[in-house]
Image (cartoon, helix red, strand yellow):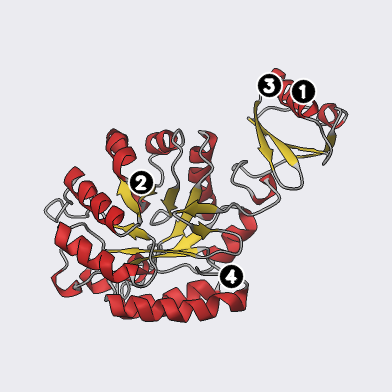
Amino acid sequence: MLVVMNSNATEIEIKRVALFLESKGFEARISHGEARTIVHAIGIIEVDQRDFELLSGVSEVIKVTTSYKLAARVAQGRDTVVEINGIKFGDKYTGLIAGPCTIESYDQMDATAQELSESNVKIIRGGAFKPRTSPYAFQGLGEEGLKIIRSVADNHHMAVTSEIMDTSQLDIFMRYVDVLQIGARNMQNFNLLKEVGKIHKPVILKRGLSATYEEWLMSAEYIMAGGNNQVILCERGIRTFEKFTRNTLDLASIPVVKKLSHLPIIVDPSHATGLRDKVEPMSRAAVAAGCDGLIIEVHHNPEVAVCDGAQSLYPWQYDLLYKQIKQIAPVVGKEIV
């Protein structure tokens, strides 16, 4: 339930509504917008909403019918915009993230970062803990990898994003990483979602391999219920019967999520397709569909990449793609810095 306050409601009236909600057994959360203030009633409790409509300063009471209350489009009157190192995701902004699948060495990361900085990349990605299907595949450099990417990012004035796999890793991620990624296999790791909900860093939440939109948004709700509203949804392809590409990129998720939620949605065309020559057209298509960002794998020398070289762009390919999507974005009312 959402209690929408009048534009001229006083802080005393807003606080009184919050206290009244709490007296009924709800958790009250106040959201101040540019045009209105909303008091969110968190909880599943049957009440007569007329009791709230009669409170001083209340404009209207909206019953939220979806299971996800905070992530729902109706929960606030504007799109959420998440800003990282000057790059914005959401509303009219389309942000870009790029970097290799895996942190292999300092020299590899530094060479890639140098090339990407020339294409105006301000957020670099790189895996230090790799969830691999085979237990014999390269699992990442761990904390040493995070130290490398942090050092390289600082040298090139970039922010860092990397995937966290377990709650036990949260302390080291807080030291080295600006944006936490929750991978597809952990989308419903509810203990992890609860813990990242307690921090004050942005979280990229990737869609599970077979997750529905509602399941995806409910996972976002876990993070937001903990107090962290800086959630970026990431479509990375879903598992279907087709085997030609690594996954099937569900571009329909962009308009669907934008109708259901106020959260920004970005696209990972690298994991979605698994093929370098498919990454570029799918990136262009995602921007044309109105996505709020792209996260793309780029390696300075993909042929020698430890993993996923086949889906990693060369830096020159990324630079060309960057120029193309800068032309596409304004056509759909978006802006790429």
Q: In the rendered image of this protein, does residue 294 appear above or below residue 195?
A: below
Quadrant (top left/top right/bottom left/bottom right) for the N terminus:
top right
Proximity of marks 1 and 4: CB atoms separated by less than 8 Å: no
Residues at marks 1 and 3, CA–CA distance in whole angstroms:
10 Å
Q: CA distance from mark 3 to mark 4?
A: 40 Å
Q: Are marks 3 and 4 in contact (CB under 8 Å)?
A: no
Residue drawn at (81%, 29%) of the image? 52
Kindly identify which residue carries mark 2: 186
| Picture coordinates of residue 293, whole percent (x, y) | 48, 64
Residue bearing the label numbered 3? 22
Asked if one can make out residue 1 in the rendered structure from this viewpoint, the answer is: no
| Front label number (3 vs 4) | 4
Q: Earlier in the sequence, mark 2 or mark 4?
A: 2
Q: Is residue 125 positioned above or below 336 on the image?
A: above
Q: Nearer the viewer, residue 245 or 157?
A: 157
Q: Amino acid at mark 2?
A: Asn
Q: Earlier in the sequence, mark 2 or mark 1?
A: 1
Amino acid type of the residue tagged 1 in the rendering: Arg
Residue to which mark 1 is pinned: 16
